[in-house]
Amino acid sequence: MKIILTIIASSIVLLIHTSSIYAALLTFDDQVNGTSSYSYDGDDDGNDDVVFSTTSPMGFSSVGPGPNMSFINEPGIVGMTNLNPDLRVDFTYGGVDNLTFSFAISFTMVENQYGVNFTIYDSNDVILATTHQTAGFTKPDGQNNSDYPEAVVSLDFSGTASYALFDFDSEAYAYIIDNFTGTFGSKEVVSNEVKSRTASIPTLTDYGIILLFLCLSFAGLSRIRTNRVKPCEL
Ligand SMILES: [Ca+2]
Ligand SMILES: [Ca+2]
Ligand SMILES: [Ca+2]
């Protein structure tokens, strides 16, 4: 009996260990403004393990809500909310168990009303799990509100995820996601923070997109609507 219990305990430890080594945290620190996809190759074998993409002609920005946030550490993936879906993530090798990420929206007139629909699918387009998570103000310093509503989505599922879709409520104008965590990919270990940060020189088109995002999304529309804000910083 003692031997059997020992084997079971060892197996549990092994399973936990096996699972943890495939977990990855994507911080988007090398996200480039103006691109329409973001790929992650955790083990540098030349095959992207995770690919984020949007059909928006504006692509992504990485400029978001600033530092007064609890769950967002810029840069992240920033986009407009007018599409359905606004953002897609594909898992080349499948994903299992759970997907977690933080997000913020640029709508500041109410909280706990608007947010994101997040749906996970298998390779046959069958829904494995879905949720709608609203965003609210947090207190990053323990006293004062965050500049924008934010939240963390953590969704468990069974089966093997092939892709997931993000549809942010269009009332929110702009969104940012950050700290995307899951068990997917080939042999990646912890974070792309350890990977070299690629310095990029924006093109004139990129500058146009950056300006547009800065002025119309987080730094512009919502703050003007609440009359409590500073002008666009550019
Ligand atoms: Ca980040
Ligand atoms: Ca890879
Ligand atoms: Ca949307």
Image: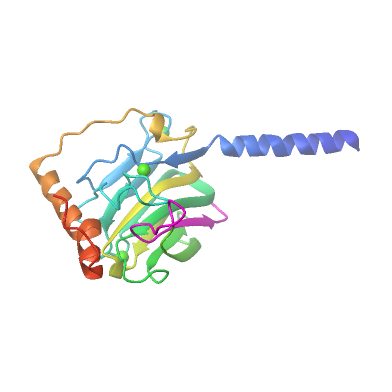
Q: Is residue 222 left or right of residue 179?
A: left
Q: Which residue is rendered at x = 49% and y = 32% of the image?
A: 189
Q: Which SS does the magenta portion mostly show? A: loop
The quadrant of the image that shows the N terminus is top right
Splitting the image into 4 quarters, where does residue 16 fall? top right
Q: Is residue 142 magenta?
A: yes
In the figure, 12 relative to 213: above or below? above
Q: Which residue is rendered at x = 22% and y = 69% of the image?
A: 225
Is residue 124 at all visible to an observer of this figure? no
192 or 233: which is nearer to us? 233
The scheme the figure's colours follow is rainbow
- Which residue extends farthest front? 143
Pinpoint residue 111: horizontal percent, then vertical percent: 39, 69
Q: Which residue is rendered at x = 41% and y = 55% of the image?
A: 164
Is residue 27 at all visible to an observer of this figure? yes
Q: Is residue 67 magenta?
A: no
Pinpoint residue 227: horizontal percent, then vertical percent: 22, 68
In the figure, 226 relative to 58: above or below? below
In the figure, 175 relative to 186: above or below? below
Splitting the image into 4 quarters, where does residue 10 fall? top right
Q: Which residue is rendered at x = 33% and y = 38% of the image?
A: 29
Q: Is residue 100 left or right of residue 97?
A: left
Q: Is residue 62 left or right of residue 118?
A: left
Q: Provide the residue span drawn in magenta.
A: 139-161
Question: Quarter containing ligand 2?
Answer: top left
Total numbered badges shown on the rendered structure: 0
- Which residue extends farthest right? 1
Pinpoint residue 71: horizontal percent, then vertical percent: 42, 51
Pinpoint residue 68: horizontal percent, then vertical percent: 35, 51
